[in-house]
Image (cartoon, helix red, strand yellow):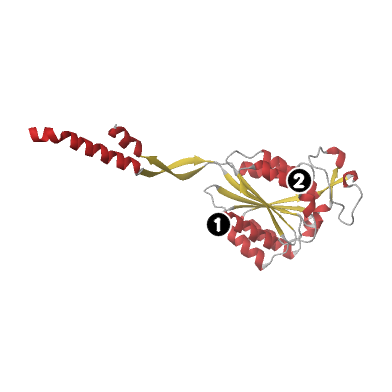
Amino acid sequence: FRGITDRLPVILGGIVLALLVISLMEPSLVRTVTVDQRARDFLVVVDTSRSMRHDANVKRDSVELRYERRAGTFASNVDDPNKLPLLARYELARESLLSFLEQRKAQDRVGMIYFNDNVFTMSAPTTNIDFVTEQLGSMDEYVNWGTDIALAMQSGLNLLERYPDQNKKAVILLTDAEAAYTKEVEEQLARVASMGISFYLLWITTDEKNMANEEITKFLDYARSVGTVIILENLDSRNLEDSLRDIGMLEDYSYKEEKRQRLDLSQPFLDAAR
């Protein structure tokens, strides 16, 4: 017994040293917990083709704009675009998107793409909504040329894949294009379905019945098969903003999300060594 007592300081010292070594190794335990989540990743794909300069049936002096217009008319340049009596489609789109961004929650991420014949990534998905808002101020510079929806959708879905997150995702495509069904468009809409993403098509038109020929109807039907189609006939100062607000409300449902939590085990060992 006396021999053990004599060796006790050495034994205790060894135990303390072992505890300190374990503490320095920063042992940890990872556990999975399920939490309620409402955050969303919204990707807004905005048509900035030349036709978005078309007049909407909204007088300029009836709406308080947050950005001045810098692009001319659909047909020609003008000395002072802000003196044009009617607002352009892209101006109403911009104002509506500003309101949509203001309604986002702190955890939401928003990405934004402009497209015509080319695609312009204005923002990858980010919680920095102020940065996305700033990009809307430059929309005038991009409102030109034609429309390539397939390329825009391909670029947008690639962007979501490059910036993964556990948030539920929704793609909002805003266009006034007389879009015909094509194999390329079908492929991108099929990707939306396979990725489990909510999809909303906001289609601006002046006359749905006369504009919707067989090819356009096929495009709209295919879009409906993977998501929701909202037809904005005779764009005004409210219908687009209301539609975007409704999308935000539709996507504001809670869902279960698994998150991994790391528990630091080094402190208990350090406390025991003390």
Q: How many marks?
A: 2
Q: Percent x, y for residue 173?
A: 68, 53
Q: In which quadrant of the rendered image does the N terminus lie?
A: top left
Q: Quadrant of residue 156?
A: bottom right
Q: Percent x, y for residue 53?
A: 83, 53
At horizontal 66% and vertical 66% (from top left) the residue drawn is: 184
Q: Is residue 54 found left or right of 129 in the rendered image?
A: right
At horizontal 46% and vertical 40% (from top left) the residue drawn is: 35
Q: Percent x, y for residue 96?
A: 74, 43
Task: Mark 2 or mark 1: name the one nearer the start of the chain.
Answer: 2
Q: Quadrant of residue 103?
A: top right
**In the rendered image, is residue 202 in sight?**
yes
Q: Residues within 10 Å of mark 1 (few under 14, many from 20)?
A: few
At horizontal 92% and vertical 49% (from top left) the residue drawn is: 79
Provide the residue designation for mark 2.
137
Q: Is residue 127 found left or right of 83 in the rendered image?
A: left
Judged from the image, the secondary structure of the residue bearing numbered disc 1 is: loop
Q: Are marks 2 and 1 in contact (CB under 8 Å)?
A: no
Q: CA distance from mark 2 to mark 1?
A: 31 Å
Provide the residue designation for mark 1.
195
**In the rendered image, is residue 1 in sight?**
no
